[in-house]
Image (cartoon, coloured by chain):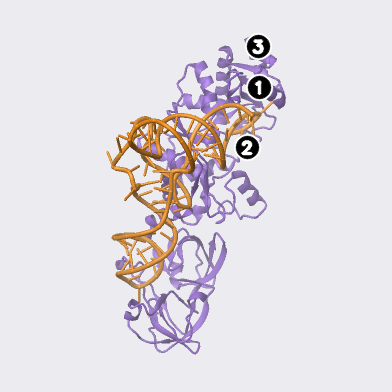
Chain colours: A purple, B orange
Amino acid sequence: MRLAPNPNGPWHLGSARMPAVIGTYKDRYDGWMLCRFDDTDPETKRPDMDAYGEIIEAIEYLGFEPDEVVKASDRVDTYYDHARELIDLGGAYTCSCGGEEFSELKNAGEACPHREKGVETVREEFEAMVDGEYGSGEMVLRVRTDIEHKNPALRDWVAFRMVDTPHPREEAAQYRCWPMLDFQSGVDDHLFGITHVIRGIDLQDSAKRQAFVYDYFGWEYPEVVHWGHVQIDAYDVKMSTSRIKELVENGELEGWDDPRAPTVASLRRRGIRGEAIVDAMIELGTSTSNVDLAMSSIYAANRDLIDEETDRRFLVREGNQIPLGGSPPDEANPPLHPNHEERGVREIPAVDSVLLEPDDVPGREERIWLKGLGCFQFTRDVLQYTGEDIDVVREGEVDVVHWVPASESVPLRLRTMTGDVRGRAEPGITEYEADDVVQFERIGFARFDSVADDGEKESVAYFAHP
RNA sequence: GCUCCGUUGGUGUAGUCCGGCCAAUCAUUUCGGCCUUUCGAGCCGAUGACCUGGGUUCAAAUCCCAGACGGAGCACCA
């Protein structure tokens, strides 16, 4: 198996499908997996030097490890060698037609005059291409397929072209003659002994194109599966590397890990496990039709993974301060996890007054149960402790809500897909470190991004999902 | 215009090759109920789909034909 990412930027969620499915096959059948960066376009899809590492990190985060990692831009000489061989076999010719000019001939099913050049001439001209003697657009090497093939997409396609812009990698900066994907990828799949290829429907014709090269060389083509595009609901931002790059550059997104960005880095920062993404991607299967992945599938998978081990805590968003009356306990001790009392309890002081979320403030004379503390009645702008038994909750008369002390709680900013929310959390959260995940009761799971060591400074958490 | 591919509930998927056991699987979502000092989970239940029209057949999601709709390619991008 192989992953063949284009390192022109960090990964969006659609890209994650590649390692998710291919890596799962590899693990399931004890296969071998190559990660080959198809970075043979220094111009239009110019490689981003940071993306090589970011992509490897993303693959690891998703839980996979390639057996070998290579860059196509390190292998250009190998492609040249195969091009020479193909020329000698009569399978390719150099062509100086303009793009439109050739396109018209091709669509009419007519060969261009260059098709009948002798092998010697072709070799000379190809060596001149390799030596950089032509500028961009002046000369290409075409594979001789079938100029009258009923599918115009397969007729004499370009294998190498000239690119004036140097490759951003120093090691590859000297090349001007670059292979096209169909040539490079086709040759490499054979050389690396790839037996199974899974890729997008945009490359549906690639197998047919590459088959001409394989026939010239007498190679056997790998098994190939094409899948449709994946869209994800819940995002306003289009899932496209170039679009996201644009939004990051003009400041509309704070970065590739902005919670509004449909990227691998964003979900990671929100504390969602790579495994949850993989689980959801696997369920999509590999049909050739386009699919919509519901974020709720990823959330459901993540919940399965983290719910049992995640501490519960209180966070009140944009709270209303209400004084306490009567003689309630001066501290609440709800469990860190309701199913695991052995993990201990939290210590939440309850003095003077509390904060409640606006929606939770009870109406006049209504009762409410502050979780871990007891039953209160809202009378004359004060929550008056009633001392009633938990039975009032069991009987459904009183709702249970979360709360925090007004004075001893700590500020926290919760970053969500729809913007930041400010609130105050119970004091115990200062025990956490960045990367810890908690469940804010009745709000949802979140990952701490930074935890302030003193209670006056604001901590920051990224909201994952309910 | 030429060439490929696809179409099963809100979403995804199984079943289609080799017609019957499919009044259609599983997951997710939504909505109820039980349980619960949150939410979730768990348990119980409900809603909800074979693109259309013909044909073949005792029998069609499945085979055939036509059409509709959707996607992809026809790049000196990947």
Q: In terms of secondary structure, where does tag 2 sit?
A: loop
Visible residue check, residue A89: yes
Task: Give the Cα separation between the discs numbered 1 and 3.
Answer: 15 Å
Q: For marks 2 and 1, give the CA distance.
A: 26 Å
Depth check, mark 3 against mark 2: the one in front is 3
Q: Find numbered disc 3 in the image and state the secondary structure of the residue it sits on.
A: helix
SS for callout 1: helix
Q: Are marks 1 and 3 in contact (CB under 8 Å)?
A: no
Q: In the rendered view of the protein, which quadrant contains the N terminus of chain A? A: top left
**Contact? badges 3 and 2 (CB < 8 Å):** no
Residue A84 sits above or below residue A317 on the image? above
- Residue A44 in picture, x, y percent from top left: 65, 36
Height in image: A72 above or below A429? above
Q: Residue at x 55, y 30 (%)?
A: A72
Tell me the residue that label 3 is attached to. Answer: A116
Pick the front one: B20 or A123: B20
Q: Which residue is mark 1?
A: A106
Mark 1 or 3, closer to the camera = 1
Which residue is at 68% across, 19% downward?
A95
The disc, 2 or 1, on the residue closer to the chain's N-terminal end is: 2
> Residue A45 shows which numbered tag?
2
Q: CA distance from mark 3 to mark 2?
A: 33 Å
In the image, B45: left or right of A243? left
Nearer the observer: mark 2 or 1; the answer is 1
Badge 1 crowding class, 10 Å Cα cut-off, few under 14, some 14 to 19, many 20 or more, is many
- Identify the chain of the residue marked 3, using the numbered disc in the image: A
> Of the residues shown, which amino acid type is indicated by label 2?
Lys
Quadrant for the C terminus of chain A in the image: bottom left
Where residue B10 appears, x then y in whole percent? 48, 52
Look at label 1 and name its amino acid. Lys
Check chain identity for marks 1 and 3: say if they share one: yes
Q: N-terminal of the two: label 3 or label 2? A: 2
